Image: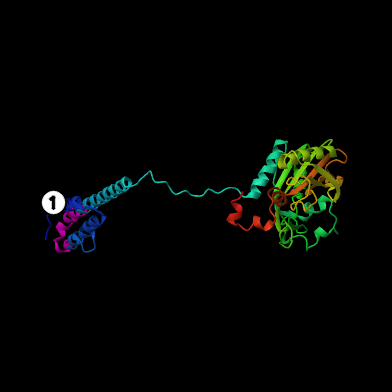
Amino acid sequence: MTFDYETEKQNSRQKIAEAADIKQIEAVRLEYLGRKGKLAAMYANLTTLPIEQRPEEGKKINEFRDIITQLIEEKKKDIVSKERRGSLKQLDVTIPGVAHPIGHKHILTQTIEEICSIFEQLGFAVEEGPEIETEFNNFTALNIPADHPSRDGFDTFYLKQQDPSDKNVNLLLRSHTSPAQIRIMEKHKPPLAVVVPGKVYRPDAVDASHCFMFHQIEGLLVDADVKFSDLKGLLTVFLKRLFGEKIKMRFRPHFFPFTEPSAEVDISCYICEGEGCSVCSRKGWLEIMGCGMVHPEVFKAVGYPKGKYTGLAFGLGVERMTMLKHGIRDIRLFFENDIRFLEQF
């Protein structure tokens, strides 16, 4: 049995042309290309033909298959294109679209960037330090003695893994950003002026004013003749830019192992202007940060020549700064991801 391929071509073209949608063109495809379609019958018929006729007949079937396949694919594309154009015509572009909320930076990130920006304008560079530190950088090089309470296992997150380059070096999660001072001074010669923001870790019980992870910003300036008056002037400019020109400041003597002399810095409450309110616990003053002149033992630890350089250092807690500036009473709000809180900033 042989097939009239020209007649089949004409019939198939007509059916494809008359197909109005995807469902109808799929029906034509199954009629010709399906498992029980006409192409399957044509291939099955080859076995009934004499051997010498099979190559020629097989060639005609393959040509017919290729033509049908191409016509069906082109018709499908044409139908899809028309359907898309029809849907666009039904689109009313005057109807307001669906607005997607745009996120913004976390309030702590905003505070860090604001503080760093102020110091950048004052000539400081912004550096970073690793959150996993050596015991030497975190304590010893900062003149913190071996019997200091902060070096106890109850006050520091020590890591079981040791430094692969030295099995005798203990690693820990840094408890302050001050170790960055050591790394920077070991790498660079004075003059240098840097601020180092980052996370720090202490095993504190979580409550309204404490968290086991929080953020600090460390500041360091080293040169040939840095004085305590430079420290006071620098921090005065910084705090007035951050909290406003009306604030007053005071420096209270304090003790830090890595600075001498050392001081705590207070500002007059920017809310009550020193009169006393709930934010400042009726004292009229807010404790802001610690500071001092870099201790000679710190310079010795990084290999700076004795008596050649002096420097100033300061450190502040980002969460505390943010809580004071925005009247936030609970540090846990920063990390609970409550959208009602975050949207306020």
| 214 on left or right of 305 | left
Q: Quadrant of the N terminus?
A: bottom left
What is the secondary structure assignment of the residue under circle 1? helix
Q: Position of residue 343 (x, y in %)?
A: 58, 51
Q: State the image coordinates of residue 176 (x, y, percent, origin top left).
A: 75, 52
Q: Image quarter for residue 249?
A: top right
Which residue occupies the foreground of this view, 90 or 335? 90
Residue 13 showing in the rendered view: yes
Q: Residue at x 18, y 62 (%)?
A: 41
Q: Nearer the viewer, residue 59 or 173?
A: 173
Q: Is residue 58 magenta?
A: yes
Q: Camera-side residue: 335 or 259?
A: 335
- Span shown in magenta: 45-62
Rendered location of residue 178, percent (x, y): 77, 49
Q: Position of residue 130 (x, y in %)?
A: 70, 51
Image quarter for residue 273? top right
Q: Main secondary structure of the magenta part?
A: helix
Count of residue discs: 1
Q: Residue at x 20, y 58 (%)?
A: 32
49 magenta-colored:
yes
* Tag 1: amino acid: Glu
CA neighbours of label 1 inside 10 A, class few (<14), some (14 to 19), many (20+): few
**What's the coloring here?**
rainbow
Which residue in the structure is indicated by mark 1?
A: 6
Q: Is residue 227 visible?
A: no
**Is 203 rendered above or below residue 120?**
below
